[in-house]
Image: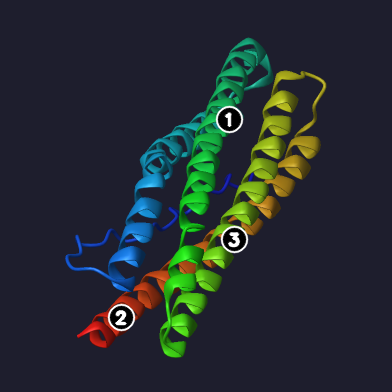
Amino acid sequence: MKRLGKMAMVSSLLMLAACSGSGIREDLDQVLNDTFDAEEDYRAVQSDLEEREKAEQLLFEETMALTQEQQGEVTDQAQEALDSADERLGFLQTEKDSMQAAEENFAEIDSVIESAEEESVIADLEALKAEMLERFAAHDEFSEAYEELIARQKELYEMLQDDQSTLQMLQEKAAEVNSQNEQVQLAVTEFNELTQQVNSLKDSTLENLSESEE
């Protein structure tokens, strides 16, 4: 039986240092810090998700090691895994709500762009906006893939509770789970790469703004 895959940790925005002064840089700094603050719940559930996944993986392996004569114990442990999967869905919803709030806060960058006058500054801000929106879209794709992963895992756990399920049926469902987990890993990688790009672009944009305001 293949292992159920674990989700890679997702990256977050880097917090900014407080900015003094006035102008476009300070306005952008405020928008980015508000966006970072809105992602607090998203960051907070990462360790909870990872802990649940590790515990669920161990529980699944222990359940698969039980024999047909231990069906009662199999049923109980499969139910525990189902409860854990539902709990992960709750954590994921918290994460999604946090990211939605962050995206709403980030929309304030439009007013920063509108107040900018230099073409180079506008170009930098537009590029940062585009990259950040792509990051939010990537998180949506991750969430969709991860929800589908949990759905297939729950199907597997429910099959474990059914004493009519054969080993072949379980293996086929486990293969579906692992295939979907590969999609999750790809989505995580894409999101992490975009987060790194946003952080880099954010730093260069703020640096350029500081130079232009000197």
Q: Quadrant of residue 197?
A: bottom left
In depth, the one of 3 and 190 nearer the eye is 190
- Residue 63 position, x and y percent, is 57, 26
* Of 58 and 198, the residue lying toward us: 198
Residue 30 point in image, percent of width and height? 32, 58
- Tell which circle, 1 or 3, labels the residue nearer the N-terminal end: 1
From this viewpoint, is residue 61 visible? Answer: no
Cα–Cα span, label 1 and label 3: 22 Å
Q: Quadrant of the N terminus?
A: top right
Residue at left offset 38%, top offset 58%: 31
Count of marks, rendered view: 3
At label 1, counting other C-alpha atoms closer than 10 Å, the crowd grade (few under 14, some 14-19, many 20 or more) is: many
Camera-near label (1 vs 3) is: 3
Q: Which mark is residue 209?
A: 2
Q: Is residue 16 visible?
A: yes
Asked if the residues shown at circle 1 and circle 2 are in contact, with their CB atoms under 8 angstroms apart, the answer is no
**Which residue position holds label 1?**
85
Give the percent coordinates (x, y) of residue 24. Answer: 33, 72
Dot 2 lies on which element?
helix
Q: Give the amino acid type for the residue marked by disc 2 in the picture.
A: Leu
Q: Which of the labelled discs sits on residue 138, or is there none?
A: 3
Relative side of 54 to 36, left or right: right
- In this rendering, is residue 59 above or below 132? above
Instruction: Using the image, determine if residue 171 lies above or below residue 104.
Output: above
Within-10-Å neighbours for mark 2: few <14, some 14–19, many 20+: many
The answer to which image quadrant residue 67 occupies is top right
What's the amino acid at mark 3?
Answer: Ala
Position of the C terminus by quadrant: bottom left
Viewer-closest of 159 and 44: 44
Label 1, secondary structure: give it. helix
Amino acid type for the residue under numbered disc 1: Ala
Q: Residue at x 80, y 30 (%)?
A: 166
